[in-house]
């Protein structure tokens, strides 16, 4: 749902590719691919790469791994402009030299690295443990305020902890490690199912001389035993090279989709013109029965997609959905795995989303899945939109600073849908344009579910008019850019909600000009297959005053005329 928007911080990075060369065969003049390097070659000590100061006190190096642009290589030559990470194996630890983030760190021998999202995070996994490390920018005037407002606002709230069955294992520690200070938080999430990682250890490592700090999140089945050794080993070095992504996500089609669902999806993916949809206040009553028909008559356009929102404590809106289908439309359903929406001080301290994560709502979710299945018509299923935010009950900011809770909960519901035979849902992943609080730990990519459980990408950006009128094309060119390193052009994208406001009402002509230009530019973004106008105004906190006019007033003849003309030109 609509919240104040800002422009996306673009991720400046590329996707690395590793190519194997074709070599002449030795038999019959045939050609074939050269075999890849052996494990022995990949872990051989290459003296050309060893920096003596980096292996000091390690007690000898018996193996080495060299990661270039996220991939392990047997090369003995380093291109310092690339994304380079070295791992030296000592007798008892592995020493990581992370050149692009500019630090050295000792980790246990059994930790396995993942550098596929290097511009955002590095991650290490072991049996019963996951460690995620990000290098963050300080945006507040000092670290105390940074951690209090941008990181730990809910995490250290005692009422929040009590309401969500989170135990503080010991008071927050402040320790010194050489030139660095560390804030250490140890929590336990109670009542997790067997096999979960209930122990959460957070470390924010910083120096007063730097505007960056390092954020560690350790999740484990048992308390982290070697934490002191890990933190004591941390050293800063000069950063060099460019961090790049080596992750790329390919689109897959579910085998269990109904023929109608597959046909609609194929048509949507293949169409050259966009479908334009609508959401209106009181959608299931006067919005759909009165306002939308009146609008369609005035603009001479039949909206092929209509949007509705429901929370976890509501049933599937079967009567409304059937009317939508009978009218030849497709329903875009936004479903919130929560009983509340806004988090910033307005929802209390309880996060119902954590109950879903614990598996305590499965029976309720199965009932809902059965209702979606029984509807049977294709629908676009938009789950927990704008998760990379501070204002939703399912964001990491109010859920242990852990985007994986979102990922695992998405997967839980997806599997329930599969088990209940749902074959008509097209799942849309829809992050906010720009991540909040600003940072790498909160970046949208951390929330990406297993890729086989995503069928469309959602784009959400608004032109509020409060700071100018960036065009539809400008907004969504920038919005699409954050996905380009990962998603090929065959991925369909939709705009599940957008609008251009006219402020307090005085910016009407600017709004009309924006709409006209939108239809002129729409074909320049072919990856976008549809857009839904969010026709509802922003109000003051007490509900007495409209602070931004987004609603399409059917009585506004000039506005209706602009829409009619724009649609006629676009579809003509």
Image (cartoon, rainbow, N blue to C red):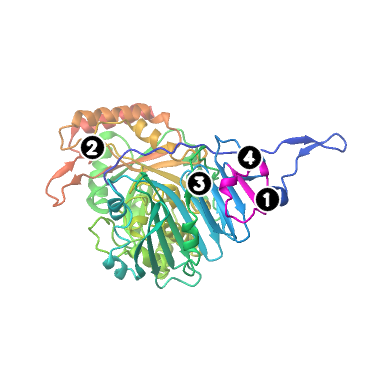
Residue 58 visible from this viewpoint: yes
**Element marked by disc 2:** loop
SS under mark 3: loop
- Label 4 and label 1: CA atoms lie apart by 18 Å
Marks 2 and 4, the one that precedes in the sequence: 4
Where in the figure is residue 537, as x and y percent of width and height?
Answer: 21, 44
The reply to whether callout 4 and callout 1 are in contact (CB within 8 Å) is no
Of mark 4 and mark 1, the one earlier in the sequence is 4
Instruction: Name the residue at 57% across, 53% down.
Output: 95
Label whose residue precedes the other's in the sequence (1 or 3) = 1
* In the foreground, 125 or 87: 87
Q: Are marks 4 and 3 in contact (CB under 8 Å)?
A: no
**Which mark sits nearer the N-terminus, 1 or 2?**
1
Highlighted magenta segment, given as a residue range: 44-68
Q: Residues within 10 Å of mark 1 (few under 14, many from 20)?
A: many
Q: Nearer the viewer, residue 324 or 8?
A: 8
Residue furthest to the left in view is 544
Q: CA distance from mark 1 to mark 3?
A: 22 Å
Residue 258 drawn above or below residue 296? below
Q: Residues within 10 Å of mark 3 (few under 14, many from 20)?
A: many
Rendered position, 256 above or below 545: below
Q: Position of residue 552 (x, y in %)?
A: 23, 39
Using the image as rendered, state which of residue 162 and residue 282 is in the foreground.
Answer: 162
Residue picked out by circle 4: 18
- Picture layout, residue 513 above or below residue 232: above
């Amino acid at each position: 749902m609509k919240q104040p928007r800002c422009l996306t911080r673009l991720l400046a990075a590329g996707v690395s590719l590793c190519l194997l060369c074709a070599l002449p065969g030795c038999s019959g003049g045939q050609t074939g691919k050269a075999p890849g390097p052996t494990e022995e070659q990949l872990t051989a000590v290459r003296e050309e790469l060893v920096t003596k100061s980096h292996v000091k006190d390690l007690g000898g190096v018996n193996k080495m791994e060299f990661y270039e642009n996220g991939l392990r290589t047997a090369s003995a030559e380093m291109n310092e402009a690339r994304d380079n990470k070295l791992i030296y194996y000592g007798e008892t630890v592995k020493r990581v030299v992370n050149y692009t983030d500019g630090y050295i760190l000792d980790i246990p021998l059994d930790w396995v690295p993942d550098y596929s999202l290097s511009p955002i995070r590095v991650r290490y996994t072991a049996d019963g443990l996951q460690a995620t490390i990000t290098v963050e920018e300080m945006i507040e005037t000092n670290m105390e305020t940074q951690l209090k407002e941008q990181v730990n606002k809910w995490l250290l709230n005692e009422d929040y902890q009590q309401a969500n069955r989170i135990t503080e294992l010991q008071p927050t520690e402040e320790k010194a490690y050489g030139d660095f200070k560390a804030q250490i938080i140890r929590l336990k999430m109670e009542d997790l199912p067997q096999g979960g990682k209930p122990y959460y250890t957070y470390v924010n490592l910083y120096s007063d001389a730097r505007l960056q700090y390092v954020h560690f999140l350790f999740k484990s089945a048992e308390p982290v035993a070697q934490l002191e050794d890990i933190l004591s080993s941390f050293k800063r070095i000069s950063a060099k090279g460019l961090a790049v992504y080596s992750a790329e996500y390919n689109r897959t089609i579910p085998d269990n989709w109904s023929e109608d669902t597959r046909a609609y999806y194929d048509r949507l993916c293949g169409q050259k013109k966009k479908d334009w949809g609508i959401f209106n206040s009181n959608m299931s009553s006067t919005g759909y029965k009165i306002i939308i028909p009146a609008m369609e008559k005035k603009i001479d356009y039949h909206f092929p997609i209509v949007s509705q929102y429901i929370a976890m404590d509501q049933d599937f809106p079967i009567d409304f959905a059937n009317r939508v289908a009978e009218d030849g439309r497709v329903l875009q359903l936004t479903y919130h795995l929560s009983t509340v929406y806004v988090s910033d001080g307005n929802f209390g301290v309880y996060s119902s989303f954590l109950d879903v994560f614990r598996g305590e709502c499965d029976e309720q979710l199965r009932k809902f899945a059965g209702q979606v299945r029984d509807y049977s018509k294709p629908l676009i299923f938009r789950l927990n939109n704008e998760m990379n935010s501070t204002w939703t009950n399912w964001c990491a900011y109010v859920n242990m600073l852990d985007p994986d809770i979102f990922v695992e909960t998405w997967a839980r519901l997806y599997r329930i849908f599969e088990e209940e035979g749902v074959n008509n849902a097209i799942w849309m992943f829809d992050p906010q344009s720009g991540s909040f609080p600003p940072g790498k730990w909160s970046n949208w990519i951390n929330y990406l579910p297993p890729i086989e459980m995503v069928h469309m990408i959602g784009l959400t950006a608004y032109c509020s008019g409060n700071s100018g009128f960036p065009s539809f094309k400008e907004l969504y060119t920038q919005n699409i850019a954050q996905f380009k390193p990962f998603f090929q052009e065959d991925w369909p994208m939709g705009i599940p909600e957008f609008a251009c406001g006219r402020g307090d009402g005085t910016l009407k002509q600017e709004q009309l000009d924006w709409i006209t230009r939108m239809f002129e530019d729409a074909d320049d973004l072919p990856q976008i297959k549809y857009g839904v106008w969010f026709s509802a105004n922003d109000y003051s906190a007490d509900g007495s005053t409209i602070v931004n006019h987004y609603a399409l007033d059917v009585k506004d003849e000039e506005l209706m005329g602009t829409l009619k003309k724009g649609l006629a030109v676009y579809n003509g």
